[in-house]
Amino acid sequence: MEVCFVRGFRALAHASTMEALSGPLSSVLFLVGVLSVHLSSVFHYHQFGNPLRLPHECGLSALFVFGLLFATSAVFRTVEGELSSGTASVALVRPLSRSLFFCSKVFGVFVALGVFLVGVFSASLLSSITAGIGQVMSMKDGTTRLWPMGVQLGVVSPILSFFLAAACNRFFQMRFCFTSCLMVALSQPVALLIALSCMDMPFASTGIDLLSVVLDFSCVTAAGFVFVAIAGALSVRLKPSYAAGLLVVMTVFSFLINLFETKAPLLAHFFRTFLPDLGKVWMPQDFMTAIFVVGACFCVTVIWLIIGSILIRGKEIL
Amino acid sequence: MSEAVIEIHNLKKTFRDFWFRPVANAVNGIDLRIERGDVFGLLGPNGSGKSTTIKMILGLLKPTDGTIRLFGEPPQSKNARKRIGYLPELSYLHPFLTAWETLRYYADLSGMSAKEGKRRCDELLEQVGLTYVANRPVGGFSKGMARRVALASSLVSNPELLILDEPTSGLDPIGTREVKEMILDLAKKGVTILMTSHLLGDSEDVCTKLAILSKGKVAAFGNTDELLVKRDDVRFTVPNLSAEESEEISKYISSKFNREVKIDHPRVPLEEFFAATVNPN
């Protein structure tokens, strides 16, 4: 029985991940998300007073904005799309529970969001290294702002991956959208490793606080999981347009609460830059706070998964 | 009496709106009993309650009243659902999965082991004639090819009860014929089949029992032969009779029994003629 459960869960989650990564919107969001992190440093969208802050903030913002857009659209496709198109009815006549169906579908989107996280996190680190080395070099020669090799690796690798995916589709009949998402995301850790191996100075001298980067990304990813779980639960009963509208209202409402509570200059920054300054709004400053945020997000995610499971149990599938 | 695979008693379904006001009475007290080995046709015009009945049997909709038993258990029972295969009216497939991955997906959902699932997927693709496109995403398939994949996926778990909603929808006459042969072949192996079809000829060809639904009620129910036989007429089929011989027999029957005789040549069913024309071998 446990084997059946695991096999069913794996099959559903795998199909859900494939579906999430298979749309053209996913390919575009992956490419734009990763490129935005690198290009923000190149075009210097924002002056935080610290050159390392920009790639860090842009990485978080890309994860928050593009990642959430990708993940919520994917969860609507995999849950509501399946329920309305009829593929769910074919799956649900098999010997598996509806709760398992819902949870594994959402888990599949979590995995897809994890792939996006790998790409954006690596891009953010690479961009930070580029800015960090550039800062050290500028102290020496006074002109260099960014490490040229880091910029080249960061900008060229996702574009090259996109074209490589197109070539794989042309010559080996591989799925373009799925391959491009994977290649763009995985190109970033590869580019990061190449950059690390080519650095002629120790990592510590770049001034990057790795723990802080990891904590911030963990919190934003956990928040993303909450959004995916809420979107999944809502899409069981609501049409995507209503569920998306409700999510937008919830997001704006939570931002407004943050704005009033922290007095953060969110709106000013939003208009001055193309991405909001998340760090000033609600990012944790220490390890324990981060653990608390991630833990709270985990609990809320589980609650919404339970709500979704209850909603799908009572749903009549026409 | 054979073992009942599906037993339905006084089944009713009323669809309600957001305020729980009744909107439509789709099913109004259906009683059915489908036995092991039956090829059962559920027929009726649009809106007669066929699909609603099937979805209640599959546990996708909850009955307003009445009971359903599959292999003696309620439709939500996992043991009962392990023994069912379902082909919906439209071939609901994930367009991004290949034909082989689609079958593998349903094999996994049915709880089959990896080795058994792989063997069964290969076997079924061979059976529906799609081995040559096994690694192509089904999103690019024609309607007929998608129908074959859907049919194969309904058979992946070796079901004892196969529920087919418009099984020949979207298939050309050759494909229709193959599906009907497959249905008869499965019935010979002891698989119980419940099918709906708008093509009455298809149901007539394969179904051993029929129920005709009208306005959510069973209007007619019984063995196909018993329901369709015209007991007021008698037909003799004799090979190679000349015109004179026919005339003589006609005159004899008219004079001896005082009956009007109609003589004609039997017609080949169009499906058979089409198949013989397109594929003479």
Image (spheres, grey):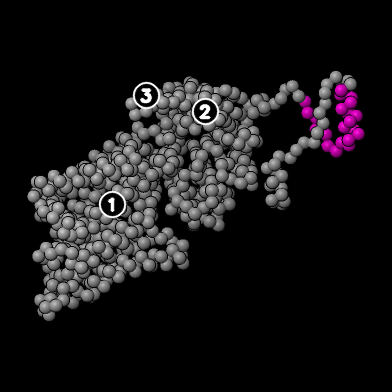
- Residue for point 58% across, 49% down: B127
Inter-mark Cα distance, 2 to 3: 21 Å
Q: Can you identify the residue that label 1 sits on?
A: A69
Q: Position of residue A175 (x, y in %)?
A: 42, 59
Q: Nearer the viewer, residue B4 or A2?
A: B4
Q: Which image quadrant is residue A169 in?
A: bottom left
Q: Is residue A312 left or right of residue B121?
A: left
Is B244 a magenta residue?
A: yes
Q: Which amino acid is tagged 3? A: Arg
Chain to which the residue tagged by mark 1 belongs: A
Q: Position of residue B31 (x, y in %)?
A: 52, 22
Q: Is residue B252 magenta?
A: yes
Which residue bears the numbered disc 3?
B21
Q: Residues within 10 Å of mark 1 (few under 14, many from 20)?
A: some
Residue neighbourhood size for the residue with mark 2, other residues' Cα within 10 Å, grouped as few (<14), some (14–19), many (≥20): many
> What's the magenta region?
B234-254
Report the amino acid beneath label 2.
Ser
Residue A44 image offset from top left, x and y in percent: 18, 67
Q: Identify which residue is drawn at 23% across, 72% down.
A: A150
Left or right, A127 with reference to B264: left
Disc 1 versus disc 3: distance between alpha carbons? 38 Å
Q: Are marks 2 and 3 on the same chain?
A: yes
Numbered disc 2: what chain? B
Is B181 located above or below residue A113 in the figure? above
Q: Which residue is mark 2?
A: B48
